[in-house]
Image (cartoon, rainbow, N blue to C red):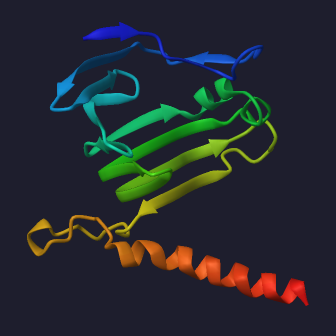
Amino acid sequence: MARRKLVLAGGVGSRDAVALPERLHWRIRPAGLGLATELQADCCIPKPWRITLKPGWTGASVLLADGSSRWPASVLTGLGTPWNTVQPEGQLTLSTQGLHLDWISNRLLMTGNARLEATDLSSRLSTLKPMGSYPHHIGKHRPGRVADPAAGDAGRQPDAQRQRPIRRLQATLRRHGRRGAR
């Protein structure tokens, strides 16, 4: 496994750069027509996290194996503005379950679950220490509900369900457009 320090920086000319306290270990190998990567860092990713990338005719697909990682919130300061002003402290935990990202014809489709939780978050901008913990869930299944592959419930939404929120937004925009044209 290759090992390097992971450093986050805000880009060209940025004076903010933050490195993880431990080295990031990775392994990349062919997986069919794509690539499989395993990531591990003693500080943040205790068990290897497998990520598979597969190119397609009109896009690409990324599959993240079920896993969890825990990062110090302070690594965000390396990304520059606004994080270098906020200077967050606390822990960030990212957990995935059946997370599959498809980039098809300039559209991103996500299935599965991702949960980001900021625990004991604080900032130099607030006298309240800690400010609290904030969970954020993304995906079809709500926390506590388990997908049932035997019943065909693998976390993927049928196309009609995926399109419903987009159609609602388009209808709202058309209505407002007609009102403004009067």
* Vertical arrangement, residue 168 with respect to residue 162, above or below: below
* Figure quadrant of residue 153: bottom left
Residue in view at x 88 percent, y 85 percent: 181
Residue in view at x 45 percent, y 43 percent: 93
42 to the left or right of 152:
right
- Camera-side residue of 88 and 100: 100
* Figure quadrant of residue 50: top left
Residue furthest out toward the left: 150
Q: Position of residue 60 (x, y in %)?
A: 36, 42
Q: Position of residue 167 (x, y in %)?
A: 55, 79
Q: How many numbered circles does the render carry?
A: 0
* Vertical arrangement, residue 106 with respect to residue 162, above or below: above
Residue in view at x 25 percent, y 28 percent: 35
* Vertical arrangement, residue 125 with respect to residue 35, above or below: below
- Camera-side residue of 147 and 103: 103
Residue in view at x 29 percent, y 65 percent: 156
* Vertical arrangement, residue 91 with respect to residue 168, above or below: above
14 to the left or right of 89:
right
Quarter holding the N terminus is top left
Quarter holding the C terminus is bottom right
- Camera-side residue of 108 and 84: 108
Q: Position of residue 23 (x, y in %)?
A: 40, 12
